[in-house]
Amino acid sequence: MDLLHVAVTSLVSLAAMFLLTKLMGNKQVSQMNLFDYVIGITIGSIAAEMATELDTPENSLLAMAVYAVAAVCISLLTNKSLRVRQLMTGKPLILMDGGTLYRENLKIAKMDLSEFLMYCRIGGYFDLSQIQTALLEHNGTVTFLPVELQRPTTPADLSLQPDQTLLQTPVILDGEALPGNLQRVGKDMTWLMRQLQSRGYHTPEEVLLAMADGNRLTVFPMESKKKPADLTDK
């Protein structure tokens, strides 16, 4: 009976944690600030304890609800008050600007030079002279502003006027055509079949994924039985 109780309370705690997380809002780990992280691990710990709390699982549910409500209230306050926002989430920290590394700010960020250089490489900068400004954002990511001469060339620099890129919409997924998505992009099955036949396909079942972008269709065929080459082979 106890084992059944544990199984049931585990499912209840999982459902409660999911609902409370949806209430607090979806965030990727990289978007979480320190407060979000603390609330998340605390609710997770309470949910785990609730799974084995056979006598009073409602106490754990109440505690989880209190933490979730507190998180929502703090989120509302940070949206309304700049001071509360800076207190709870912090503000960007300048690590480098105009060729100067700010050692004190690196200390505040608990980041040594090796870590800073690693973030530069991850950002695609192997030469520090290409960086105008480096900022540590409140979610822990490091963002970079390149020097003007090192930034990528844009069509505006060349006085070009390229066509606007449109959002690609899947019209075939796993070999199944999606009429609803075709309708959203102003196309129909006749157009889709004509596009497929022009590429040598006879049915949507031969296509793993097809993405529509205006009058353009990008097609990825079903995987062949031939395995891709192993890049580790010598």
Image: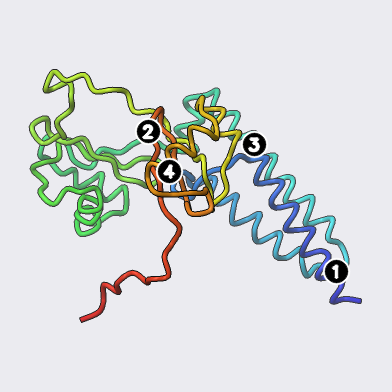
Q: Nearer the viewer, residue 168 or 78?
A: 168
The span from disc 2 to disc 1 (Cα, nearest Å) is: 59 Å
**Circle 3 sits on which residue?**
72
Kind of residue sitting beneath label 2: Arg
Amino acid found under the numbered disc labelled 1: Leu
The percent position of residue 141, horizontal first and vertical second, equals 35, 46
Work out whether 116 lies above or below 102: below
Q: Nearer the viewer, mark 4 or mark 3?
A: 4
For label 2, the residue is: 216
Which of the two labelled residues, at mark 1 and mark 3, occupies the earlier sequence position?
Answer: 1
Sequence-earlier tag: 4 or 1 = 1
Question: Which kind of residue does numbered mark 3 sit on?
Answer: Val
- Residue drawn at (30%, 38%), measured in percent from left and top? 93
Q: Earlier in the sequence, mark 2 or mark 1?
A: 1
Disc 4 and disc 3 in contact, CB within 8 angstroms: no
Instruction: Tell me which numbered mark, 4 or 3, is placed earlier along the sequence.
Output: 3
* Structural distance between the alpha carbons of marks 4 and 1: 62 Å
**Type of the residue with mark 4:** Gln
Estimate the spatial distance between the alpha carbons at disc 4 and disc 3, rounded to whole Å.
53 Å
Q: CA distance from mark 1 to mark 3?
A: 29 Å
- Quarter of the rendering containing residue 184: top right
Residue closer to the observer: 201 or 213: 201
Which residue is at the front of the view, 198 or 71?
A: 198
- State the residue at coordinates (44%, 49%): 201
Instruction: Measure the C-alpha gap from mark 2 to mark 4.
Output: 14 Å
Residue 173 rendering spot, x and y as whole percentages: 53, 48
Query: Residue 54 got which mark?
Result: 1
Which callout, 3 or 2, points at the residue further toward the start of the chain?
3
